[in-house]
């Protein structure tokens, strides 16, 4: 069964098959979550079976809402489906739009609702191996250094978030 996501076609929001939206570079809705503990961010390494950016490191969770799904509901659902994270209050940080080539002729042109959640390092995780290969906590400073020194191991959208939208996403954190 094809996954239908909300995308703009000829100026109107319509359900479009996810892969088709990426092949055509259609502007579409998305959700990104950053789980934070102190000045550390939980990042995930995308599973090798993902059809784009496999094996690359990304923010805690990023996804597309189903057609007519509320973004907050989507963020809550996907944190559980990808990482087994439940009951973390999500805080909406704002909306970001970007366009990025993600390999294989695919384009992410996303209008993203960005959320953060705060927790402790001992957060229980149950990564779904079809979605997530690995997870790790990284300080914002170390992540910025790693993005500069080994850019190829990170998703294009993580670069965009950290380089262009850090202040909005991490505004409650000192030193950002």
Image (cartoon, helix red, strand yellow):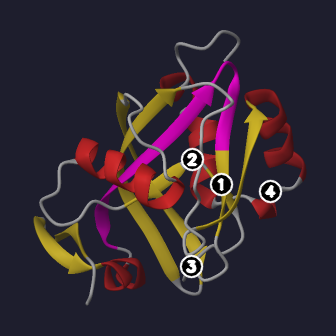
Q: Nearer the viewer, mark 4 or mark 1?
A: 1
Q: Residues within 10 Å of mark 2 (few under 14, many from 20)?
A: many
Q: Residues within 10 Å of mark 3 (few under 14, many from 20)?
A: few
State yes or no: discs 2 and 1 in contact (Cβ < 8 Å): yes
Q: Is residue 87 above or below residue 79?
A: above
**Nearest the eye: 140 or 167:** 140
Q: Which residue is mark 1?
A: 44
Q: Which residue is mark 2?
A: 60
Assess whether residue 29 is covered by the magenta stretch: yes
**Which residue ends up furthest to the right in the rendered image?**
149
Which residue is rendered at x = 31% and y = 72% of the image?
26
Assign the C terminus to one quadrant of the image.
Answer: top right
Mark 3–mark 1 Cα distance, whole angstroms, equals 13 Å
Q: Which residue is mark 3?
A: 50
Mark 2–mark 1 Cα distance, whole angstroms, equals 6 Å
Measured as percent of width and height from the top left, residue 37 is found at: 64, 24
Instruction: Classify mark 3: helix, strand or loop.
Output: loop
Mark 4–mark 1 Cα distance, whole angstroms, equals 15 Å
Question: Splitting the image into 4 quarters, where does residue 121 fall?
Answer: top right
Please report the bounds of the magenta region as a residue range.
Answer: 26-42
Q: Which residue is mark 4?
A: 151
Mark 4–mark 3 Cα distance, whole angstroms, equals 19 Å
**Nearest the eye: 169 or 71:** 71
Q: Nearer the viewer, mark 4 or mark 3?
A: 3
Q: Is residue 150 above or below residue 109?
A: above
Left/right placement of residue 170 relative to residue 63 reads right
């Amino acid at each position: 069964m094809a996954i239908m996501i909300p995308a703009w076609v000829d100026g109107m929001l319509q359900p479009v098959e996810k892969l088709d939206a990426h092949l055509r570079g259609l502007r579409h809705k998305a959700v990104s979550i950053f789980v934070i503990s102190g000045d550390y961010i939980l990042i995930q390494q995308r599973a090798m079976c993902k059809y784009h950016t496999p094996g690359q490191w990304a923010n805690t969770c990023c996804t597309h809402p189903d057609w007519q799904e509320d973004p907050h509901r989507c963020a809550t659902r996907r944190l559980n489906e990808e990482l087994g994270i439940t009951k973390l209050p999500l805080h909406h940080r704002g909306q970001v739009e970007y366009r990025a080539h993600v390999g294989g002729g695919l384009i992410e042109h996303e209008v993203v609702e960005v959320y953060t959640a705060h927790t402790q390092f001992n957060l229980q995780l149950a990564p779904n191996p079809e979605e997530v290969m690995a997870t790790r906590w990284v300080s914002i400073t170390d992540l910025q250094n790693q993005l500069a020194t080994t850019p190829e191991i990170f998703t294009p959208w993580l670069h965009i978030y950290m380089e262009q939208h850090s202040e909005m996403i991490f505004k409650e954190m000192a030193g950002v």
